[in-house]
Amino acid sequence: MFRALWIEKTEAGQQACRLAELPESSLPSGDVTVQVAYSTLNYKDALAITGRAPVVRQFPMVPGIDLAGTVLSSDDARWQPGQAVLVNGWGLGEVHWGGLAQRARVRADWLLPLPAGLTAWDAMALGTAGYTAALCVLALEAHWAAQGVQPGSGDVLVTGAAGGVGSVAVALLARAGHRVVASTGRPQEQAYLRSLGAAEVIDRAQLAAAGKPLQKERWIGVVDAVGSHTLANACASTRYGGAVAACGLAQGMDFPATVAPFILRGVTLYGIDSVMAPQPRRQAAWARLARDLEPAMLQAMSRTIGLGEAPAAAAQVLAGQVRGRLVVDVNA
């Protein structure tokens, strides 16, 4: 038997989440069974657990788009019992049972070896949020390299900066030598964001309302985890030839913009998908995280909760009350 968060549909058709004891025989099909040590609580996990959005597409479901642990058994020669591994994305917690459990069974092709220098806790302190931030930064850096743009040549905006993606993006960009402007709706987190490397902190209200199609040029690049008017305003104020990496929808899924920034300033909008990204891109992102983020910084931006605390924490995530990252100790 193992403990897991369990999402099911009630007779009334409503979604309900509870802590359950499940037999190992109930695990879905897959090549590798993993003893999970830690998972995380991302924005998408919070949506799934609360039922706020139709993230879960099959019921019943174990949520959790991330996990880190050790191989218990494997039908694939690439993975051996005792090997430290991680998985993120690939439909975990949506169409395949995820990581908010003490056991998981997954396809061998989804696994990555735990990067050298990272513990299982470290990996989940980063999780999909950190990995997505790294994908955003890598996309911007490839764009800048093609244009000969050097770190320090202009401001880089990070929206939703006090959240999981934003926190890691601020740290990665600052470590690379960029002047980072952090946008947040939580002014009390200014000291935290500056500790991650932000040179300036602005109120999200400056970007959250409808704005002009073209605005004063400021950003050489943007990491946006917010969407809606924030993304539209970020594009409208990006400098000529700049780039925006969009990866989230905390404000909304809509994009109330015009083509003006793209056809008059040559701005490029990169869509960052973390779920189905190919393995070489995943490996590059995780290698960057392992290289640039020190354990002390991960400790500063993360806190650990037990598996049973996840449902209440999910509501806090959606209410914007959680700073940085939540690591879930599935055995606590």
Image (spheres, rainbow, N blue to C red):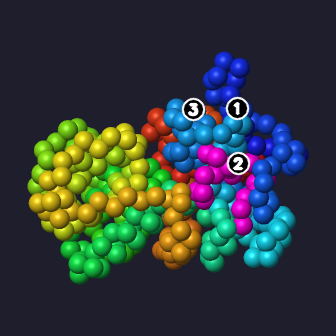
Specify the quadrant of the image occupied by residue 171: bottom left
Q: Residue at x 77, y 50 (%)?
A: 28
Residue 279 percent coordinates (x, y): 57, 71
Residue 288 percent coordinates (x, y): 49, 74
Give the CA distance from mark 3 to mark 1: 10 Å
Say whether residue 12 is magenta. no
Say whether residue 104 is magenta. yes
Most common SS among magenta residues: loop
Q: Residue at x 18, y 52 (%)?
A: 259
The first of marks 3 and 2 along the sequence is: 3
On the rendered structure, is 215 left or right of 279? Answer: left
Which mark, residue 97?
2
Characterize the local packing of mark 1: few (<14), some (14-19) or many (20 or more) Cα atoms within 10 angstroms: some
Q: Residue at x 14, y 47 (%)?
A: 213
The first of marks 1 and 2 along the sequence is: 1
The region drawn magenta spans 88-108
Towards the viewer: 108 or 70: 108
The first of marks 3 and 1 along the sequence is: 1
**Whether residue 147 is visible:** yes
Amino acid under disc 1: Glu
**Could you say whether the residue bearing mark 2 is in a helix, strand or loop?**
loop
Amino acid under disc 2: Trp
Q: Residue at x 65, y 64 (%)?
A: 110
Which mark, residue 8?
1
Amino acid under disc 3: Gly
On the rendered structure, is 317 left or right of 157? Answer: right
**Whether residue 204 is visible:** no
Discs 1, 2 touching: Cβ within 8 Å: no
